């Protein structure tokens, strides 16, 4: 037990009675298999991602060399069954996202898009031939996918998309543009959502199809270790065999993919916040100002405590969400609330951590500025904070205020 002297001695750090990043022992609530998944992804991040990520962020490059290692661990399409996929449960997928984003949001984004936005729709809505053709090679990382929903004139309202597909004989002809598409410049295939006479449908557009281009969007200040591009479609002829036959016509199918990816994001951003708090705990205990460690100030401790509170609440929210998902009871509005809450928590933690590092907080030597900049994208994509707030508002009131 701590003595009064221990407590009173300024600058003396007391040994923590519990893991500062897991105050409610989430780890203890995991199965052996889930813990194993977390540990193997954590090792990948510590050994392969963290040593290279800052350089990639500075140079605005995606660490493509990591794809085979990510695939070898079964992290691509990890919750899908068959076709070389690992068939893991929702908690495991969440833990994968959390550990990857502890490294960098760009790495988690790559896995989210490949798994939830590209492999998932092919698995859920594709023909047997499409599944056989694409999924096994996507699981090994040999083929990379992207998901084109957002358009230049406004992503929050995808129902108003301009990209359209017209039947020509047994083919379709696609015209339009998509904007802010993760993985687009490195993708072998794109799931493109386009308006048809019957309503919105999903098409598999392949690299090399005439009239299709996917240029890189340069000069981002956020997600610099992720490849983001536009998709341009000019009279692209897509065969009927590349239409997703099982998707309902309308927004429901693309929105169902977003639900999968948003679920992963709720876990991912916890990892980013943990990385910031972890570094900040070391920093504030070793930096001496006014004759005592920074961490010995009440104002600093309150801010650290607020971070721990935010992370803990987010962990509990995501764990329960995963349990609901595994039980087949997860609702889109529950995902909206967790995406909003956890992204807001993480960006607040990252920004506050940056501030508590003082001038060092703007240096590449420390992680909070990189996470804070990345989280500007994460809080925007997959539905902005406002979109998720309005989704909850609609759920509560029954009134659509979009
Ligand atoms: P609304 O009338 O609400 O819905 C149309 C139909 O879809 C159903 N639905 C959903 N189904 C599954 N999951 C969801 N989350 C769903 N939300 C709605 C709904 O029940 C309805 O079905 P039915 O049978 O009645 O037809 O449609 P709305 O036009 O009013 O729009 C609602 C709104 C604003 C919430 C939606 O448009 C929206 O979510 N907007 C935000 C768009 C967005 O998030 N874009 C993300 C693009 S992808 C991306 O950002 C990837 S980043 C990846 C990375 O790098 O990690
Ligand atoms: P807009 O929709 O124009 O919104 C602008 C502002 O208006 C926002 O603050 C929004 O909250 C607010 N707003 C909108 N509607 C209302 C309303 N009714 N009431 C009040 N406020 C409102 N998209 C893809 O399809 N695939 C991808 O892979 C992908 N990857 C991305 C990667 C990055 C790095 C980024 C930054 C974005 C990515 N996106 C992707 C796009 C992303 O989903 C959109 O940026 C997002 O949905 C918002 O759309 P927008 O940028 O057009 O903003």
Image (cartoon, rainbow, N blue to C red):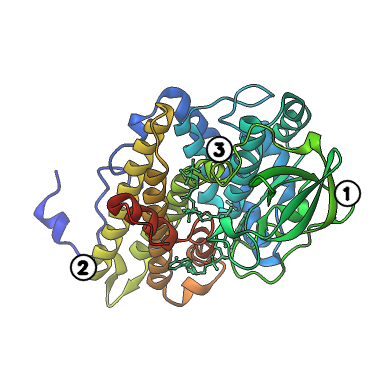
Q: Which mark is residue 208?
A: 1
At 45% from the left and 30% from the top, the residue drawn is 35
Picture quadrant where residue 324 is located: top left
Whole-percent x, y for residue 198 in the image: 66, 45
- Determine the CA span between mark 2 and mark 3: 36 Å
Question: Does residue 142 show up?
Answer: no
Q: Secondary structure at mark 3?
A: helix
Q: Which residue is mark 2?
A: 298
Alpha carbon separation for disc pair 2 and 1? 60 Å
Q: How many marks?
A: 3
Q: Which mark is residue 41?
A: 3
Helix, strand or loop status at disc 1: loop
Residue that appears at 44% across and 33% down: 91
Q: Nearer the viewer, mark 2 or mark 1?
A: 1
Q: Which of pointers 2 and 3 indicates the residue nearer the eye?
A: 3
Residue in view at x 78 percent, y 29 percent:
133
Tell me whether the residue at label 1 lies in contact with that at label 3, contact meaning CB atoms closer than 8 angstroms. no
Q: Answer yes or no: disc 1 within 8 Å of ligand 2.
A: no
Q: Is residue 54 left or right of residue 325?
A: right
Q: Which mark is residue 68?
A: none
Residue toward you, 93 or 255 = 255
- Does label 1 or label 3 sit earlier along the sequence? 3
Q: Nearer the viewer, residue 329 or 317?
A: 329
Residue 121, by quadrant, is: top right
Q: Position of residue 65 (x, y in %)?
A: 74, 46
Mark 2 vs mark 3: which is more N-terminal? 3
User: Where is residue 68, by image quadrant?
Assistant: top right
């Amino acid at each position: 037990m701590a003595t009064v002297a221990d407590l009173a001695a300024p600058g003396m750090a007391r040994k923590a009675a519990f893991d500062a990043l897991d105050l409610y022992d989430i780890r203890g609530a995991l199965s052996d298999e889930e813990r194993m998944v977390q540990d193997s992804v954590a090792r990948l991040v510590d050994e392969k991602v963290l040593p290279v990520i800052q350089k990639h962020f500075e140079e605005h490059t995606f660490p493509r060399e990591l794809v085979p290692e990510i695939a070898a661990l079964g992290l691509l399409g990890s919750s899908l069954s068959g076709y070389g996929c690992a068939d893991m449960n929702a908690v495991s997928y969440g833990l994968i996202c959390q550990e990857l984003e502890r490294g960098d949001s760009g790495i988690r984004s790559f896995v989210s898009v490949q798994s939830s936005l590209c492999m998932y729709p092919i698995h859920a809505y594709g023909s047997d031939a499409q599944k056989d053709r694409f999924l096994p090679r996507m699981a090994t990382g040999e083929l990379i996918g992207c998901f084109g929903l957002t358009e230049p004139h406004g992503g929050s309202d995808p129902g108003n998309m301009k990209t359209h597909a017209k039947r020509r004989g047994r083919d379709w002809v696609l015209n339009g543009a998509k904007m802010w598409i993760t993985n687009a410049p490195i993708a072998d295939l794109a799931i493109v959502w386009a308006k048809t006479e019957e309503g919105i449908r999903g098409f598999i557009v392949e690299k090399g199809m005439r009239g299709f281009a996917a240029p890189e969007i340069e000069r981002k200040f956020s997600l610099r270790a992720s490849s983001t591009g536009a998709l341009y479609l000019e009279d692209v002829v897509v065969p009927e065999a590349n239409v997703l036959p099982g998707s309902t016509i309308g927004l429901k199918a693309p929105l169902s993919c977003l639900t999968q990816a948003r679920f992963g994001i709720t876990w991912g951003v916890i990892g980013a916040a943990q990385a910031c708090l972890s570094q900040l705990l070391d920093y504030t205990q070793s930096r001496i100002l006014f004759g005592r460690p920074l961490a010995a100030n009440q104002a600093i401790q309150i801010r650290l405590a607020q971070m721990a509170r935010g992370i803990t609440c987010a962990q509990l929210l995501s764990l329960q969400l995963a349990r609901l998902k595994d039980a087949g009871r997860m609702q889109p509005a529950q995902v909206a609330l967790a995406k909003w809450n956890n992204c807001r928590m993480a960006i607040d933690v990252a920004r506050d951590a940056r501030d508590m590092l003082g001038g060092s907080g703007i240096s590449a030597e420390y992680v909070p500025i990189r996470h804070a900049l990345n989280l500007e994208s994460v809080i925007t994509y997959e539905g902005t904070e406002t979109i998720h707030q309005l989704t909850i508002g609609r759920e509560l009131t029954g009134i659509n205020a979009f």
